[in-house]
Image (cartoon, rainbow, N blue to C red):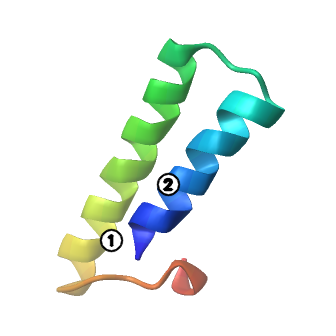
Amino acid sequence: MWQAFIKGFKAYLQLERNLSENTVDAYLHDVSMLADFLQSANGGPTALGEV
């Protein structure tokens, strides 16, 4: 569910925003941590539209 969003977000950051690799990695780490938190807080996967 979140994997497709993260993949698209990574492409956006690299291609559209032209951010450095370290910055992209930091953004992706933060988004992954958010997804993990939402999953643990809700007892299961959270749809992106619910965020």
* Res 34 → quadrant: bottom left
Q: CA distance from mark 1 to mark 2?
A: 15 Å
Which residue is pictured at 45% across the width and 39% down the height? 28
Which residue is pictured at 57% across the width and 42% down the height? 10
Q: Is residue 25 left or right of residue 41?
A: right
Residue 20 screen position, x and y as percent:
62, 13
| Nearer-the-camera pick, 49 or 3 | 3
Residue 42 screen position, x and y as percent:
26, 84
Look at the numbered discs 1 and 2 and tell me whether their residues touch, using CB distance below 8 Å.
no
Which residue is pictured at 32% across the width and 49% down the height? 33
Report helix, strand or loop for mark 1: helix
Residue 2 screen position, x and y as percent:
42, 68
Compared with 26, 9 (above or below) is below
The label shown at residue 38 is 1
Report helix, strand or loop for mark 2: helix
The number of numbered discs placed on residues in the rendered structure image is 2
Give neighbour class at mark 1: few <14, some 14-19, many 20+ (Cα, 10 Å): some
Q: Is residue 1 left or right of residue 7?
A: left
Residue furthest out toward the right: 16
- Along the polypeptide, which appears first: circle 1 or circle 2? 2
Give neighbour class at mark 2: few <14, some 14-19, many 20+ (Cα, 10 Å): some
Q: Amino acid at mark 1?
A: Leu
Q: Amino acid at mark 2?
A: Ile
| Nearer-the-camera pick, 9 or 27 | 9
The label shown at residue 24 is none
Marks 1 and 2: which is nearer the front?
A: 2
Q: Quadrant of the C terminus?
A: bottom right
Q: Quadrant of the N terminus?
A: bottom left
Which residue is pictured at 53% across the width and 78% down the height? 48
Compared with 33, 22 (above or below) is above
The label shown at residue 6 is 2
* Res 24 → quadrant: top right
